[in-house]
Structures are given as structure tokens and as C-alpha cells.
Image: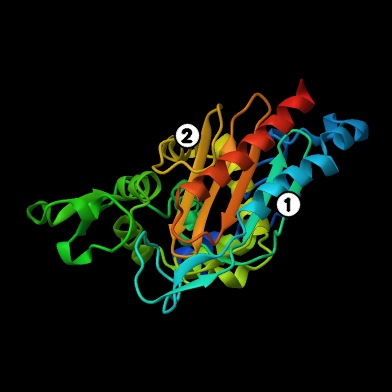
Amino acid sequence: MIILTFALALVLIYFTSTDVAPVEAEVSSNTPSIDSSSDVASSIPSDISSDKTSNVSSKEKIILEFTPEEISQINALIKAAENSQLSSASSSNTSSSDTSSGNRVAIPSSVSIYFEDIESGYVYTNNDDYKYFIASLIKAPYAMYLYTLAEQGKCDLEEIYTIEYKNIQVGTGKIKDMKEEKFPLSMSVRELISYAIRYSDNTAMEALRKRYNHIGYQSYANSLGLNYPEDVSYIVNGKITAKDAGIYNKAIYNYIQTGKYGNELKEDMSHTTNPIIRSKYPVVRKYGWAELSFHDMAVVYAPHPYLLTILSDKGLGNSKDHKLFADISKLIETFLENRYE
């Protein structure tokens, strides 16, 4: 009788301790929070953090700050680009696409910047709370989320999905350009992630989003310490500020350094189409491009790595907009090189 009672107790303990919560919500709830000043992404041990702030003196931090003259140079570039642009009067700005239509009206443009020197922790921002439609910028942190699920055994990267021709999404991507006879198309989760990052493929992103929905991602994004977690919305139709894009970018940098699938994420983000932020050094990036959204978020692997995000509502990104991003990138690269030289 004693043995039977003990056995029943063990069975009761097992079933009451088993977690039956949904996959997405469960994963995110265990992710520790980080704020914009933290160097440690979720689940990264502090003893292997890449943060070197403690090794930099206060004097060195002051030297690394951009001078008023340097900030004036950045502002001059932005000011010169603040001319009105044409936009569709009927646009709701809620789809990731390189196309637009409708009556055209003139609107003012905005530009926001988030820069962070990895070694010193020095941060420079410009217009960092202005909200933009996030466009395809979201695909990079969402990929990081899926890799985090995979590390915990809650996302099978080799699971195969079937994409029908009717599932094709408009806008950017490579799948939409495939001939109809290639469908139904079978792709693994790993391949879908790669397509979503490299080609900013909307069809691949939609297939992933249907399986790993916004509920889990919202909790995960909130755990990163976003200032406006409510703007995540349904993932692909959310909003973003330069400040929150900087938090995403920092988490991606940390995941690349220490995550199990960090090298895969880095490889895909090193081979994206449409480079907008420019550098003579290797760049890991994800751009976002839609009507009233022209963004790029990058980790620049210079001898002293740094994070740079430039957001704008510069229409569909013409040659002048590309030049603005390239000029801002070059200025900041030069400023940093001058400091460390």
C-alpha cells in the first residue's frame, strides 16, 4: 500500500509540473529583459558578454562623443534632404512592398539615426522617437526569434512547408518570380528564414508567420526591452523608432556573437540585396523598403565594431535617398576612425 501511494504521488508530481503552454508564449516568457544600455541579449551568460565598457575610462568615453561640429555635419546632410517628396494619397503604409499607386501628394520627409560604439558604449541618436512603418526591417529580429525557439527545441529548422502558387505575396522576394510550374514548392524552415533575410521575401515571411505567430513574437520582442512594444502589432505591419531599432540591432549583434545559430544569421544578413548603409568594412544588415519607409539596420565589423541604424520615410528610395544614407554612413565611419587612430 505504501509503495502504491508513493507511485501515485510521483505520477501526480510529473503531470502537475508539465508545461502545456503554447510554444510561442512559453518561449518568450523565459527570456530575461534587457534595456537599451545592456550588452547582453536574452539567455546570454554575463561572463561571455562582448561588453568592454568597463575597460574604457571616462576620459576615453568623452573623446568618443561626436563634437558639435561633427553633429552639425550630420544635420546638414539631413537638412539638405528634407525637401518634399511625392507619396500616394490613399496609402495606408501597411504592406512591405516596392510598389505604390494612387494620387500623388507632396509630404515632408523625416530621418532618424541610432549609432552605438560597441567598445565604449557611446550612443548618438537623432530624432530617435519618431515612429515609422517598420517594413521588412522586422525580418531580422523575427529570424533571431525563430533561432531562439530552435535552440530550445521548439522550432524544427528542417521541417518542410509546402507553398502553393496562390500563397505568393506581393512586394519583395524571389519566390514570387518563380514560374507557376515550380509549385507546389517545398521549403524547410531554415530555407524560408534565409529567403526572408537575403531576398526580403514576403512569401517566405508569411509562411513562417502563420506557423510562429505574433503572440509569441510580441512577448519575445517585449523581453528585449523595447520602448514601444505595443507597436510590434502583427509583426509585419508594426511601427519602429530608431531607439527601438537600436535595441533590436544590439540583440542581433549579441546573438551573432553567442547564439547557437548566430553564424547562420550573420551569413544571411551579410548577403542581403539592396545595401543602403555603406562601409569599406564587412556589414551585417537588414533593410526595410516600402512606401514611406526606407530603412537600413546594420552591424559594421570595423576594427572597432559599431551599430548603425538609419530610418526614414523617404518614399521608395531614389538615388538621392541612397546617397543620403551613404553620406551619413561615411561621416560616422570617418568620425570613429579618427577617434581610434
Residue 279 horizontal/vertical position (percent): 56, 32
Nearer the observer, 22 or 230: 230
Q: Which residue is mark 2?
A: 263
Q: Which residue is mark 1?
A: 125
Whether residue 338 is visible: yes
Disc 2 marks a residue whose amino acid type is Asn
Give the residue furthest to the right.
59
Mark 2 or mark 1: which comes first in sequence? 1
Give the residue furthest to the top.
341
Above or below, comparing residue 104 to residue 128 in the picture: below
Left or right: where does residue 225 sit relative to residue 2? right
**Disc 1 crowd, CA 10 A, few/some/many (<14, 14-19, 20+):** some
Disc 1 marks a residue whose amino acid type is Thr
What residue is drawn where x is 48% and y is 49%? 287
Above or below, comparing residue 31 to residue 261 in the picture: below
Q: Secondary structure at mark 1?
A: strand
